[in-house]
Image: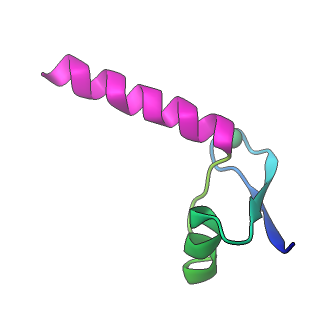
Amino acid sequence: MFYYECTCYCCKKLFKMMEGSRKYQLYKQNMNGKFSCEACDHKIYLEARKNLISKL
Ligand SMILES: [Zn+2]
């Protein structure tokens, strides 16, 4: 299986994007973009949700 290794812009750790995943597709389209690992994705999601709730 192919994968890309990318540095998470959030925690600066290397993580893998497996072929066929959404992130892999995004990375192929924009290799200079910012990408975050699974753990940070989850953190960002929770933060975004918290901010959204506080705005309601
Ligand atoms: Zn991360």
**x and y, in percent, of residue 54 in the image:** 22, 17
Nearest the camera: 37 or 2? 2
18 relative to 24 in the view: left or right = right
Residue 13 visible in the shown view: yes
55 relative to 22 in the view: left or right = left
**x and y, in percent, of residue 40 in the image:** 61, 37
**x and y, in percent, of residue 7 in the image:** 75, 55
36 relative to 15 in the view: left or right = left
Is residue 42 inside the magenta stretch?
Answer: yes
Q: Quadrant of ligand 1?
A: top right
Relative to 48, say whether 56 is above or below.
Answer: above
For the image shown, how many numbered marks are present on the structure? 0
The residue depicted at 68 percent of the width and 46 percent of the height is: 37
The residue depicted at 79 percent of the width and 52 percent of the height is: 15
The residue depicted at 56 percent of the width and 65 percent of the height is: 22
Relative to 44, say whether 51 is above or below.
Answer: above
Residue furthest out toward the right? 1
Residue 2 found in image quarter: bottom right
Q: Which residues are magenta?
A: 38-56
**x and y, in percent, of residue 56 in the image:** 12, 22
5 relative to 28 in the view: left or right = right
Is residue 4 inside the magenta stretch?
Answer: no
Residue furthest out toward the top? 54
Residue 3 found in image quarter: bottom right
Residue 32 visible in the shown view: no
How does the figure colour the protein chain or chains? rainbow
